Image: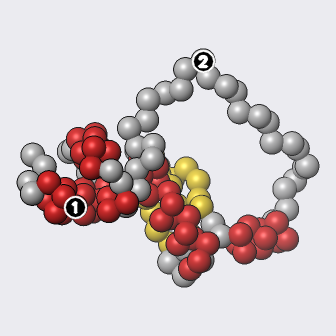
Amino acid sequence: MAEMVVSASALRVFFKDLANSTAEEQHRVVITRHGHKLVALVSQEDLEFLRKHKPQPTERPVPDPVPSQEAPYDPFIGAEHPGEVPTSEIERVYRETEGTDDEYLRGWRSVAAQVLKERTGRVPG
């Protein structure tokens, strides 16, 4: 079992892969924003353990999310492994993540550059 630390941006880009890793291999994912730990993604087995050994102090219903008038722009929605994404989407996310210092996103960009070179014959610039 491994514990990974990823940024909120990386979570949006790689949610499918991280969720599968958590479910299949019992990995735990700590999500950060601006270097501060926010929440964790844990397997169903870990959640059951928490429910049994650390129950909620009160049974309060989870509030419904407040609907926003306009959904905020999120450049990472729909982005997955670059090999599974249309070329135009890879190029868009690649542009949006330029200059990132997030290690996970830099790895994604490296794979994306290889995929774009294979598909288009050119390296993104």
Residue at 59 percent across and 59 percent down: it is 40
Kindly report the distance in space between the C-alpha atoms of the residues bearing marks 1 and 2. 37 Å
* Position of 116 relative to 51 (above/below): above
**Helix, strand or loop for disc 1:** helix
Q: Amino acid at mark 2?
A: Gln
Q: Are marks 1 and 2 in contact (CB under 8 Å)?
A: no
Total count of labels: 2
Quadrant including the N terminus = bottom right
Q: Position of residue 8 (x, y in %)?
A: 46, 48
Which residue position holds label 1?
Answer: 115
Which residue position holds label 2?
Answer: 69
Residue at 91 percent across and 49 percent down: it is 59
Q: Amino acid at mark 1?
A: Val
Q: Position of residue 43 (x, y in %)?
A: 65, 70
Q: How many neighbours does mark 1 have within 10 angstroms: few (below 14), some (14-19), or many (20 or more)? A: many
Would residue 66 be found to the left or right of residue 38 on screen? right
Would residue 62 be found to the left or right of residue 14 on screen? right
Disc assigned to residue 91: none
Front-most of 51 and 79? 79
Would residue 124 be found to the left or right of residue 6 on screen? left
Q: Position of residue 47 (x, y in %)?
A: 73, 67
* Residue 10 seen anywhere in this rendered image of the structure: no
Residue 105 quadrant: bottom left
Q: How many neighbours does mark 2 have within 10 angstroms: few (below 14), some (14-19), or many (20 or more)? A: few
Which of disc 2 and disc 1 is earlier in sequence? 2
* Position of 12 relative to 42 (above/below): above
Residue at 61 percent across and 72 percent down: it is 23
Residue at 60 percent across and 18 percent down: it is 69
Which residue is outermost to the top? 69
